[in-house]
Image: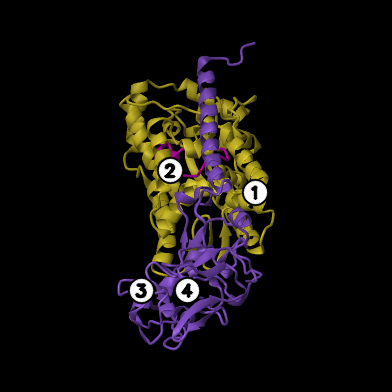
Chain colours: A yellow, B purple
Amino acid sequence: MKGNLKTLGVMLGHDPEKPKTISPEAQTIYLAQQCQKKDVAVLKKELETLRKGHHPKKWRSRRWTVLILINLLFTLSFGLDIQLFEGSLIASRVLGFHMADLYSALQVVLAYREMSINLLIGTVTVLLMWALLGGRAFCSWVCPYHLLAEWAETLHVKLVEKKWVSDHPVHRGLRTVFFLVFALLAFLTGYSLFNSMNPVGIVSRALIYGPTLAMIGVVLILLFEIFYSRRAWCRYVCPMGLTYGLTGVVSPVQITYHLSECQHEGVCLTVCEVPHVLECVKKNRAEHPQMDIGVDCTLCGACVDVCPTHSLRFEVKGVMK
Amino acid sequence: MKLFPSPTTRRRFLRTLALFIGVMGTSLANLLPVLAKWTPSRLRPPGALEEEEFLASCIKCGQCVQVCPVQALRLADLTDAAGLGAPYLKARHQACDFSCDVLQCILACPTGSLSPHISKKEEVRMGLAKVVRPEACLASQGLGFKGFARGSQFPGMLRYTEIDRWNPLPVNTHPYDLDLCDLCVRQCPIEHAISLQTLDGKRKLPVIHEACVGCGTCEMICPVEPTVIVIAERKTWEKP
């Protein structure tokens, strides 16, 4: 199981809580760390040396390669008529297999109140696939809007550093509200409203079928993220991402945290799209010496890339340790 | 008891509310033009369900666009509000000439938005052709037609079965030389959908019959500018 069920509540909007009890093993490590307390300057120097000789963007390069390759295959399949990936990220046939995005399919089913067999096959395929590959891994490894939002985020962070803008966080529970309200609206109005305004669909279709005016809307969301609220769409709105998060509850693919090596300097928290999943890296917040981080994690690997002590690692449960 | 423990949480609540209203407002503002029928009336692909059901069930993936051999289908943009991403045709630019034979778009549709119950082109009902400018029709003036139906720059495609049974060809590679223009009847892919009715002497006028499926091939091929014959979207046959 990925994370545990407590982190499911955190994904839906709860603030992460301090653990009520800390296991004796973890307590021992915390105590040992307390005793060896180092001077900040010394620690900084140590971390600096640790960082040297390790590729700082390893996982990001891998992830961008995969993301661009998948989207490129969609584009080329139509553009060059090679027919490997027909359709778009919303629904497609990949090498002949039906696939359908889960929340888009839910919208259709609620609005139309019928489910064709092909849609059912596509939905189940995607459900199983991401339950295996790690839920929101879809977001950071496949979603083309995610890539645009990452670039916007880089810009936002630079502007924040220069103190030209500041981040305006919103309650994370809003995404859960959108998930429910859009589902309810589809059922009540008989129109799959979210599907027509979903930036993921707009970007994916624009990449495949050519630019559209609707991309203006996507640019507006990106501007909102750059100047006002960091990663707003992915963090507070996208019900699609939440749906993949729900499939990830049972996923064996995981980023795990290892307390013993951690220096708690917190760089991982600054690079994470969903920092609430990394609550356990804070001092006295890890219940056990080894923790799975929460289900809202997109498995982007930014924290793995940035961690100087190798305390955060990719892991596949039951396969590798 | 204070509603908010601190000004920070109060401001965050207000921002949350504002973002909620913003996103919901945008999506409802998208729905309004559709409900009020301000959005353009569209000629939908073969097999499309009734407009409301069609928009509800279409998942906006574009697989129909990909399989069409003449690339007749395009996806709606912002102009269609909540219909954004749903497929339609502009018959004058590129009609559905059924060169795929098996209704590929219907087969590709994952949601049944293009009804899988339709298996033959004769069963399709996209709309109905209508002669809107009979006075401009070449046949009604007793005139013939020579050259490319839509000029040499026209990018549209059509299957000329007598030349190539399997592949549609560009209309601008196929010149005509006709004593009396009968392009709409000649190129119609459906039997008994359209015929020429004699007015007097050499003068004739196209008449639409019940078999018409509204594919728009007549609208596309009509050499008169603007076209004499157009498709009325979703219109069904009524006894004259």
Which of the labelled discs sits on residue B230, or is there none?
A: none
Tell me which secondary structure the magenta stretch mostly adopts: loop
Using the image, tell me which numbered label, if any, was put on residue A217. 2
Which contiguous range is marked in magenta? Answer: A294-311
Query: Is residue A14 in view from this perspective?
Result: yes
Q: Is residue A124 left or right of residue A265?
A: right
Q: Which subunit holds the residue at mark 3?
A: B
Instruction: Answer few, some or many: residues within 10 Å of disc 4's Cα (few below 14, many 20 plus, some between 14 and 19).
Output: many
Give how far apart the Cα atoms at labels 3 and 4 are. Answer: 12 Å
- Was residue A307 drawn as part of the magenta stretch in this picture? yes
3D distance between C-alphas at marks 4 and 2: 35 Å
Whole-number angstrom distance, CA of label 1 to CA of label 2: 24 Å
Say if mark 1 contacts mark 3, CB within 8 Å.
no
Query: Do callouts 3 and 4 mark residues in contact (Cβ within 8 Å)?
Result: no
Q: Position of residue B206 (x, y in %)?
A: 50, 77
Is A235 rendered above or below residue B58?
above
Q: Secondary structure at mark 2?
A: helix
Q: Check disc 1 and report the residue beneath it.
A: A190
Instruction: Label 1, secondary structure: give it.
Output: loop
- Tell me what residue is drawn at x 51 percent, y 59 percent: B42
Foreground mark, 1 or 3, reads: 3
Q: Which residue is labeled 3 in the image?
A: B150
Q: Identify the amino acid type marked 4.
A: Thr
**Three-letter residue code for mark 1:** Gly
Dot 3: few (<14), some (14–19), or many (≥20) neighbours within 10 Å? some
- Residues marked 4 and 2, same chain: no
At x 62% / y 39%, what residue is drawn? A181
Q: Quadrant of the N terminus of chain B?
A: top right
Q: Chain of mark 1?
A: A
